[in-house]
Amino acid sequence: MTDHSDKLFFRRQYLFGPEPYCPNACWKVQGFEQGFFLSAHEDVDSYVLSTSQRSLALIGFFVDPFHPEKSSAEILRGLLDNLSSAADLMERTAPLGGRWVLIYKDTDHFLVLNDPCGLRQVYFAGDDNNFWCGSQPEIIRQVFDLKRNVEPLLSSFVKSKGYGWQEGAWVGPGTIWLGCTHLLPNHYLCLRRMVVERFFPVEPLPQVAVPAAVDESARILKNSIEGMALRSPLMLPVTAGYDSRVLLAASRDSLDRVECYVDRMGIIEEDHPDVEIPRQLTASLGLNFSVLNSEERVPDWFLRLNRINVTRSRNLPKSRMIYARYKDPVAAININGNASEVCRNFFDKYLDLVEETLPASRLAEIFFGEETDFATREIAAWLKELGDVDPMGYLVLDMLYWEQRMGNWGGHFPAEQDIALEEFSPFNNRRLMTLLLACPTAMRAAPDFELYRQLIQQMWPELLDYPFNPAYSEKLSLRQRIRTFLGGLRG
């Protein structure tokens, strides 16, 4: 390690359990009820509030798009005031964005839940007499003995081509450590019994007309970015894709606090549409736009430290962006378009699939490009636990992306990035996601993604004057995919 190790050691992470954890001067400890302690790195916000009847702790940050001026602490206090039950807490977090974990205790409940897509991750191990919750298995290993999972099916899975092509995407709630479990989206952990319970969805998708859904969705996106811009400068990557174009439109009234950029990562050519389209678009509108190129190889010491911090930390081309932000720190929060794909039919972009004909083995193939016994087993267990959501209007493929893809792969990169900077995904909002999922599936499908075009039309129609994802050289595209794959293998 280097002289930076204290600051970077489990940076922006937390640990909750029966003893304080304070490995160095960069950590703070707060007492919780009945002998429990919340330990957190100084670069992640954490709060503990209590009344005579209940206690509530927050790790991370909230943003309330219906009250963007409120801070995380104010939102937390508002949640605790007049809170009637654990179910009430879950309902009242539905409109909140951010990247957060909540710990709640009253006379009847002691539980942990996190943001809609699990971007602030929760792992746990132990039993009801000695349990630990933390941001990564690696931090739990500091205080609790975990043994490596050497199951043959798991070993075969992590050596599979699909695992490599999908940047080491995981599936299921398990980990590489026996007895250490990952809390997936739409679930909470009951600490009294050390069991996981589903709390969403329990009601049908809202019945809402498309214009009303577009209006409210635009308001949520705009106010979420405004709320974050009131707290910190922001960085917004802009490409030729739909997600970043929607977020640029939503940033229209906050651009004095938003830096627009794209990072070539040493693999994207100067004339690639993801560089050229946003460069032309921003120039025509008089916006500042930077083309970065984080091409420097990530040094071994930095990779080793992030492997200490984050289970299965990778060395991908985009890892260069993390190292570049570490070398040249910015006092800004990075905006990310992830979670949007839940509402853009990611696994069935062109509506070619018939959901009734998709067994777990086929879902595993759709997920990873190939079927593996481990993935099939985990998805079969998830399908059984998910139950019958079709009558409520939710599609299995959408829920697969939400809970398995976002809950695992989606939360992995922000955890790796915590060593250098914080990230915010405006689409990571349960109210927003249910509004978009309630719209006709055909409007969420390729190639036109009509629902997203309507969002842009509502917020900044001039952004529709430029093409989305125009075709580019297949040779170059293949070369980039191969380089990305090889980078994943090296990780």
Image: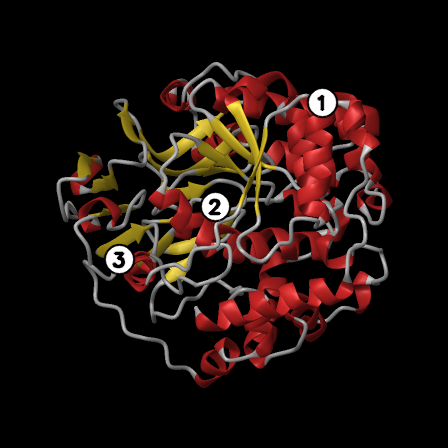
From this view, report whether residue 244 is shown above or below residue 405.
above
Q: Which mark is residue 83?
A: none
Residue at disc 2, secondary structure = loop
What residue is pinned by disc 1? 285
Residue 337 lies, in percent from the top left, at 60, 41
**Quarter occupied by the C terminus:** bottom left
Q: In terms of image quadrants, where is residue 461?
A: top right
Residue at disc 1, secondary structure = loop
Name the residue: 61% across, 57% down.
Answer: 386
From this view, report whether residue 369 is shown above or below residue 53.
below
Q: Are marks 2 and 3 in contact (CB under 8 Å)?
A: no
In front of the other: 73 or 422:
422
The earlier-in-sequence mark between 2 and 3 is: 2
Residue 267 visible in the displayed image: yes
Residue 10 lies, in percent from the top left, at 27, 50
Q: In terms of image quadrants, where is residue 95?
A: top right
In front of the other: 219 or 242:
242
Pair 1/2: label in front: 1
In front of the other: 327 or 44:
327
Pair 3/1: label in front: 1
The earlier-in-sequence mark between 1 and 2 is: 2
The earlier-in-sequence mark between 3 and 1 is: 3
Q: Amino acid at mark 3?
A: Ile
Name the residue: 43% across, 43% down.
Answer: 113
What residue is pinned by disc 2? 119
From this view, report whether residue 461 is shown above or below residue 429.
above
Q: Amino acid at mark 2?
A: Leu
Q: Which mark is residue 140?
A: 3
Name the residue: 21% across, 56% down.
Answer: 130
Q: Residues within 10 Å of mark 1 (few under 14, many from 20)?
A: few
Cα distance in 3D space between marks 2 and 3: 18 Å
